[in-house]
Amino acid sequence: MDLYNFWFSQNGDYIFSRNLNVYRTTSSTGSTNTFDADISAIGKIGIEGYYGLRDLYHSNDYLWLIKEVAFPTDESTSLYQVEDNDYTLVKSYDYDLIYQPDAQTTPIDVTANFVFVNKEETEILVLCKGLSSNFWIMQFLSVE
């Protein structure tokens, strides 16, 4: 079992691991304060050609995922909407990989680090960081 870089679902019922496995939280709890159980995955998120899960947000009926481009880079280029009942891909979204606020500013390569979705699931917020700087920006995408 790999729980390196893991996320809990918003309601706490599930654990999602970096390797895209899904675990039921209740199967990992025991009567002691020390976690020493061997739990089995109940599913796997169906995204082709992944190198690692970077961030995950669970809202209503969907998982919103950012995946890494390659291992062990910190770079990501894709955002995915996945069904939360069978973990199948619904849609992928692209966000801007270069930020240039005006023509006089040097462009900055950015990568997504965090994803959030509004309650109505009509807008995605992607929090991006400069690849070679400490510069952070927010991008807003419409859910189609």
Image (tube, rainbow, N blue to C red):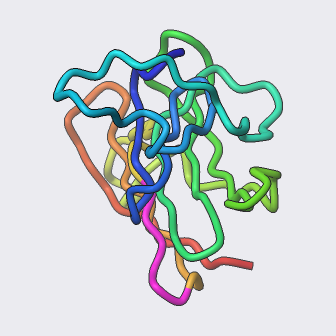
Q: In the rendering, at what x and y percent does residue 133 appear?
A: 25, 31
Q: Residue at x 64, y 66 (%)?
A: 62
Q: Which quadrant of the view contains residue 11?
A: bottom left
Against 79, residue 47 (above or below) is above
Task: Describe residue 5's horizontal placement relative to residue 58 as left or right.
Answer: left
Q: In the rendering, at what x and y percent does residue 50 appear?
A: 71, 26
Against 6, residue 137 (above or below) is below
Q: Which range is magenta?
A: 115-120
In this rendered view, identify the residue nearer to me: 64 or 36: 36
Q: In the rendering, at what x and y percent does residue 122 appear?
A: 59, 85
Against 32, residue 106 (above or below) is below
Q: Residue at x 29, y 22 (%)?
A: 35
Q: Residue at x 82, y 52 (%)?
A: 88
In this rendered view, identify the residue nearer to me: 64 or 99: 64
Task: Describe residue 43's horizontal placement relative to residue 34 as left or right.
Answer: right
Q: Which quadrant of the view contains residue 108?
A: top left
Against 122, residue 4 (above or below) is above
Q: In the rendering, at what x and y percent does residue 47 appear?
A: 78, 38
